[in-house]
Image: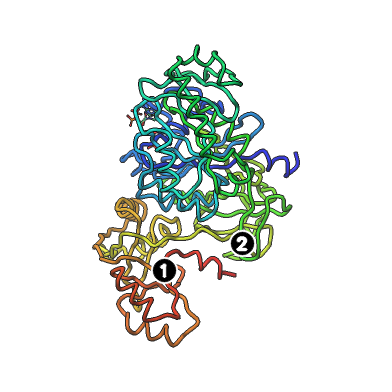
C-alpha cells in the first residue's frame, strides 16, 4: 500500500484529563471497541490498568501511578488508531506536555460534576500553543453534576476555546435517559452497562415527533426540544475546519464506565479527526507525504530490565516510511544507526515491525544514543522543533552521599536528565547541581533510580527559586554585567545554555527591567528554534 494511503488511515491522539475524570476508563473502553482487548469491566479489577499502560518501573508498581507514557494501537473501521497514553499524575505533567507534541489531536475528558479543574487548564494551554484539535468528552452523566449550558460556559471561559455540542444530555444522575445526537439526529438511550459494548441507538430525524415522547417521556421530550432550540441559537453549527484549526471543540456527553456514548465518540472521532500532520523543523515544515523518512524522539523509557541498562526511545514518524534494519541519520550525533528490532505496541502486545508510517509511534531499543527531541532522517540535516522544557516549579540541590560513587552519580543523573525525568541546572562557575521538577514525586523517582540502577546515593536539599529562565541576548556587555551582578543565580542547563534562577517573581521582574536587552525565556523552545 502506498505511503499516502497508509498515512491517511492513521489517527494519532492523546486522551487527557485532570486525574479521576475518567481518562483510564475511557481509554479501556476505546480499546474494547477496537477489539484490542476482550474483557469489559476490567477497570474494576484493575487488570488492564496494569497491562495496557506500560508500567515497567518498579517504583510505578509500588505506587500504582502510571509514570510512563505508552502507546496503544488498534484498528477500527478503516482506521489505524494510535492512542498515546499520558500519565495522569500532575507531577508527571512534563511527560504529558512532551507527548502532546507527538499527537495530531486530543480527547479531553471532563467530569460533569467537577467541571474544569486545575490540570485541565494546564493541558489545554499546551494544546492551544500548538493549535491541537480538541474533542471534549463530558463524563459521568450517570451522576449528578453541573447543568450542560453552565458547564459549556465554564469551558469556554476557562479553557479559551469555543465549544460546539454534538450530543446533548437528557437529564443526569438517576434521571439520566441518554443523549440526543444533534449531528446525526439520533437518540441514544442509556442503560447502565458496564460490560457490553452496544448502545441502544435509535434514529429520530424529527424531534418534534411523538416518538420522542414515547421513548423518554413528555416532560424530558419537551425540555430537549426547548434546549435544542437554544443550542441552535447559541452555538454555531459544527465546522470541521474550525475544529481542525483548534478554534472550536466539539463536545460529547456520556458515561465511560457504562460504555455509554463511547462508540458515538469513537465513530465521530474517526470521521472528523485529522490524519497525521506535518511538523515544524529548523528549516521549514516537513509534511507527512514527503517521500524521505523523518521522525523525532519524544519520550525515553528506561530500564525495562534493570539488569541491562536498556532504554526504549519512542519515535513519532513524521514523513516517509520507516524500515527495519535500514541505516538512518541521527542528526545531533551526526551518525548513522540502524534498528534491528523496532517495536510497535498493540494494546498489551509488543511486536517487532518491518515498517511504519507517518503518525505511527515506534519503540527503538537504545543504549544511550538518544535524548528527548532527537531527530532521525534519511540524511537530511534538519531538527524538529517544539519539544520544549518548561520552567520547573520545585528546585532542590543534589548532594552526593557516597563520594566513592561520584562517577556513577554523575553518569546516572545525566542519563536521567536525557530521559526527561527532570531538569538540571549547574551553578556557574562550579559543579553544584540544582534539579528542577514540576512535582515532588520526581525526586523520589530520581533517588530510587540512582540507587537501584547506578548504585549511587544522594539526598536533596530544598532551594527556594521561583523560576528558571533561559537567557539570551545580542548585547554581550549587558550580559557580562548581569552575570557579575547575579553571580549566585547563574547556571547552565545540561546543554550548556545560560539560565537565570530567579528567587522571586519580583526579582525576575526587576531583572527584566534593569537589563532590557536580555531576553528571559520561560520555556526552552527558543533553543530549538536557534539550533542548526
Ligand atoms: P483517570 O484515569 O482520569 O484518573 O480516571 P479513571 O478512569 O481511573 O476513573 C476515576 C474513577 O471514576 C474510577 O472510580 C472510575 O470507575 C470512575 N468513573 C469513570 N467513568 C465513570 C462514569 O462514567 N461514571 C461514574 N459514576 N464513574 C466513572 P474509582 O472508584 O476510583 O475506581 P474503580 O474502583 O471504579 O476502578
Q: How is the image coloured?
A: rainbow
Which is nearer the eye, 27 or 326?
A: 27
Q: Tag 2: Cα neighbours inside 10 Å, few (<14), some, or many (≥20)?
A: some
Q: Is residue 354 above or below residue 74?
A: below
What is the spatial separation of the Cα atoms under label 1 and label 2, in whole angstroms? 22 Å
Report which residue position mark 1 lands on: 493
**Viewed as shown, does residue 15 lie left or right of 455?**
right
Q: Quadrant of residue 203?
A: top right
Classify mark 1: helix, strand or loop: loop
Q: Tag 1: Cα neighbours inside 10 Å, few (<14), some, or many (≥20)?
A: some
Q: Is residue 44 above or below residue 456?
A: above
Image disc number at residue 281 = 2
Residue at the image point whose x is 73% and y is 40% from the top: 5
Task: Please state, as top left, top right, bottom left or bottom right, where the C terminus lies in the image.
Answer: bottom right
Q: Is residue 509 above or below residue 245?
A: below
Furthest toward the bottom, the residue is 477
Q: Nearer the viewer, mark 1 or mark 2?
A: 2
Q: Is residue 244 visible?
A: yes
Residue at the image point whose x is 26% and y is 60% from the top: 460
Residue 212: x, y in percent?
52, 16
Q: Is residue 363 visible?
A: no
Which is nearer the eye, 257 or 418?
A: 257
Q: Which quadrant contains ligand 1?
A: top left
Task: Indicate yes or no: mark 2 CB to ligand 1 under 8 Å.
Answer: no
Task: Please state, as top left, top right, bottom left or bottom right, where the N terminus lies in the image.
Answer: top right
Task: Indicate yes or no: mark 1 CB to ligand 1 under 8 Å.
Answer: no
Residue 155: x, y in percent?
43, 43
Q: Earlier in the sequence, mark 1 or mark 2?
A: 2
Amino acid at each position: 500500500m502506498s505511503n499516502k494511503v497508509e498515512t491517511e488511515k492513521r489517527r494519532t491522539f492523546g486522551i487527557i484529563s485532570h486525574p479521576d475524570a475518567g481518562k483510564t476508563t475511557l481509554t479501556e473502553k476505546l480499546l474494547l471497541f477496537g477489539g484490542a482487548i476482550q474483557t469489559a469491566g476490567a477497570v474494576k479489577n484493575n487488570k488492564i490498568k496494569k497491562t495496557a499502560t506500560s508500567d515497567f518501573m518498579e517504583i510505578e508498581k509500588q505506587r500504582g501511578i502510571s509514570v510512563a507514557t505508552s502507546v496503544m494501537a488498534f484498528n477500527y473501521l478503516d482506521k489505524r488508531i494510535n492512542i498515546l497514553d499520558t500519565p495522569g499524575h500532575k507531577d508527571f505533567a512534563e511527560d504529558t506536555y512532551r507527548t502532546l507534541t507527538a499527537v495530531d489531536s486530543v480527547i479531553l475528558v471532563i467530569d460533569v460534576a467537577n467541571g474544569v479543574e486545575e490540570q485541565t487548564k494546564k493541558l489545554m494551554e499546551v494544546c492551544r500553543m500548538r493549535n491541537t484539535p480538541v474533542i471534549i468528552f463530558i463524563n459521568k452523566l450517570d451522576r449528578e453534576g453541573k447543568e450542560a449550558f453552565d458547564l459549556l460556559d465554564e469551558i469556554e471561559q476557562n479553557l479559551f476555546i469555543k465549544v460546539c455540542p454534538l450530543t446533548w444530555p437528557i437529564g443526569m444522575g438517576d434521571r439520566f435517559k441518554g443523549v440526543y445526537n444533534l449531528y446525526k439526529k439520533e437518540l441514544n438511550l442509556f442503560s447502565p452497562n458496564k460490560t457490553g459494548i452496544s448502545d441502544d441507538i435509535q434514529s429520530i430525524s424529527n424531534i418534534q415527533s411523538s416518538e420522542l415522547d414515547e421513548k423518554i417521556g413528555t416532560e424530558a421530550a419537551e425540555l430537549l426540544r426547548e434546549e435544542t432550540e437554544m443550542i441552535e441559537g447559541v452555538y454555531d453549527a459544527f465546522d470541521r475546519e474550525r475544529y481542525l484549526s483548534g478554534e472550536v471543540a466539539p463536545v460529547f456527553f456520556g458515561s465511560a464506565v457504562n460504555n455509554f456514548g463511547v462508540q458515538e465518540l469513537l465513530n465521530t472521532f474517526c470521521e472528523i479527526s485529522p490524519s497525521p500532520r506535518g511538523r515544524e523543523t529548523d528549516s521549514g515544515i516537513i509534511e507527512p507525504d514527503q517521500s524521505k523518512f523523518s521522525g523525532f524522539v519524544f519520550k525515553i523509557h528506561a530500564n525495562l530490565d534493570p539488569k541491562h541498562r536498556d532504554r526504549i526511545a519512542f519515535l513519532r514518524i513524521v514523513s516517509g516510511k520507516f524500515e527495519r534494519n535500514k541505516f538512518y541519520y541521527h542528526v545531533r550525533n551526526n551518525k548513522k544507526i540502524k534498528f534491528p528490532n523496532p517495536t510497535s505496541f498493540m494494546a498489551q502486545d509488543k511486536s517487532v515491525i518491518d515498517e511504519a508510517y507517518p503518525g505511527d509511534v515506534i519503540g527503538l531499543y537504545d543504549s544511550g544514543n538518544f535524548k528527548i527531541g532527537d531527530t532521525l532522517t534519511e540524511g537530511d540535516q534538519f531538527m524538529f522543533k517544539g519539544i520544549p522544557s518548561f520552567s520547573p516549579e520545585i528546585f532542590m540541590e543534589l548532594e552526593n552521599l557516597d563520594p566513592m560513587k561520584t562517577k556513577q552519580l554523575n553518569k546516572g543523573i545525566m542519563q536521567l536528565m536525557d530521559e526527561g525525568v527532570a531538569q538540571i541546572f549547574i551553578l556557574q562557575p562550579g559543579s553544584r547541581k540544582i534539579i528542577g521538577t514540576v512535582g515532588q514525586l520526581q525526586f523520589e523517582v530520581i533517588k530510587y533510580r540512582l540507587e537501584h540502577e547506578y548504585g549511587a546515593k544522594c539526598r536533596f536539599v530544598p532551594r527556594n527559586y521561583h523560576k528558571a529562565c533561559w537567557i539570551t541576548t545580542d548585547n554581550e556587555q549587558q550580559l557580562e554585567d548581569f552575570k557579575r551582578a547575579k553571580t549566585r543565580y547563574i547556571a547552565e542547563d545540561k546543554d550548556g545554555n545560560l539560565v537565570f534562577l530567579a528567587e522571586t517573581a519580583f526579582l525576575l521582574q526587576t531583572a527584566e527591567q534593569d537589563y532590557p536587552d536580555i531576553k528571559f525565556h520561560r520555556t526552552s523552545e527558543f533553543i530549538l528554534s536557534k539550533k542548526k
